[in-house]
Amino acid sequence: MPDPQLYLQAMLTAAIASAISVLAMASLKRSAGMTWLNSACVVGIGVGLSAGYHVLALRLTWPPVSGLNRFLTIVIPAAVAIELAAGFESVPHWFAWSLRLGLAATIPRILLHNSVYLSDSDFTWPLWQASLILVGCGVLVAALWSLLTWLNQRSSGVSIPLALSLTIQCAGITIMLAGYIKGGAAAFPLAATLAATTGGTWLISKRSGTSPRICNPAIIGIGVVGLSGLLLIGRFFGELSTTSALTMLLAPLLCWVTETPWLRNRKPWLVGLIRLVLVAIPLLWVLAEAKSDFDRDMAPLLTHASVATSGF
């Protein structure tokens, strides 16, 4: 059964560990450059995720035998490593994006490896269907990653990472309501870590006079990878609907609405607030639908179980 207290503890642990790590690394250099700030951001995310998942006590095996295991032991570490390398000035921009797009293209194949969809079973997809789904999912992840990074370059701030954190939190709750409790729980430390790291980099940027866009690409990259991986797990290993998964995946792109002429030159805090509100609207709709489906499908079973327990 879900344990809200455990999830809250995992989120607080992840957030505190991330914030302390980022601020501690930043304090080591008074005039930290772009590479150092990016490294502090990535290390903060890595430390926060490790602490949060330790609290959740998710059982990891090697070699990984499930989509969730591959997400935690392959996909997320790969995203962290890529963003750490991409922050070094000696790494060419084209090479960093080659790594990012390569990971985006392979996430679906990694998570679905040896699953009933790609192995010899009654549920195995035909070659054309498997190719269409794997390529289509990879293209969507790459497009989301590219568009959010581009928007961050056009308009800096903390709203884009926070929008990703909000979406990941919603995805976790929705996946749990769809029946995959462990898959949904994995979202909570990630959402807390991204939010705390964003807050830490914002404080650093205020103190040093640098732009948050220096560190945001790493937060955005890991956030996009985490969001897409969780949604793929919820869709193909849980009962998450395709409509809900696509809605949550594309919701952060509503941040682009603020690039319209009427909103572009508004005060930064107002632009950020509008972005978060726009992203929250479809997320609330997804949560309402998930809750409605849960009440319809699961409430009678829970009531029956409660009655049976009382009778026993």
Image (cartoon, helix red, strand yellow):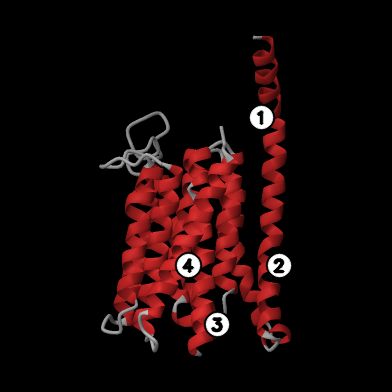
Q: Which of marks 3 and 2 is nearer the N terminus?
A: 3
Q: Determine whether, in the image, residue 146 is placed left or right of residue 305.
A: left
Q: Which of pointers 2 and 1 lies earlier in the amino acid sequence? A: 2
Tell me which residue sits at (39%, 43%) in the image: 67
* Mark found first going from the N terminus, 3 or 1: 3
Query: Quarter of the image holding residue 4?
Result: top right
Q: Mark 2 points at which residue?
A: 277
Q: Where is residue 79 in the image (x, y as percent from the top left)?
A: 36, 63
Closer to the eye: label 1 or 4? 4
Amino acid identity at mark 4:
Ala
Amino acid carrying mark 3 in the image:
Ser
Do the CB atoms of the residues marked 4 and 3 lie less than 8 Å apart? Answer: no
Q: Is residue 67 left or right of residue 178?
A: left
Q: Do the residues labelled 3 and 2 touch (CB within 8 Å)?
A: no
Give the structural element (helix, strand or loop) at label 4: helix
Point out which mark residue 298 bears.
1
At x 62%, y 72%, the residue is 255
- The location of residue 294, given as percent across then percent down, is 67, 36
Among numbered discs 4 and 3, the one appearing first in the sequence: 4
* CB under 8 Å between discs 2 and 1: no
Q: Badge 3 is on which residue?
A: 156
Mark sitting on residue 265: none
The residue where tag 4 is placed is: 19
Badge 4 crowding class, 10 Å Cα cut-off, few under 14, some 14 to 19, many 20 or more, is many
Mark 2 residue type: Val
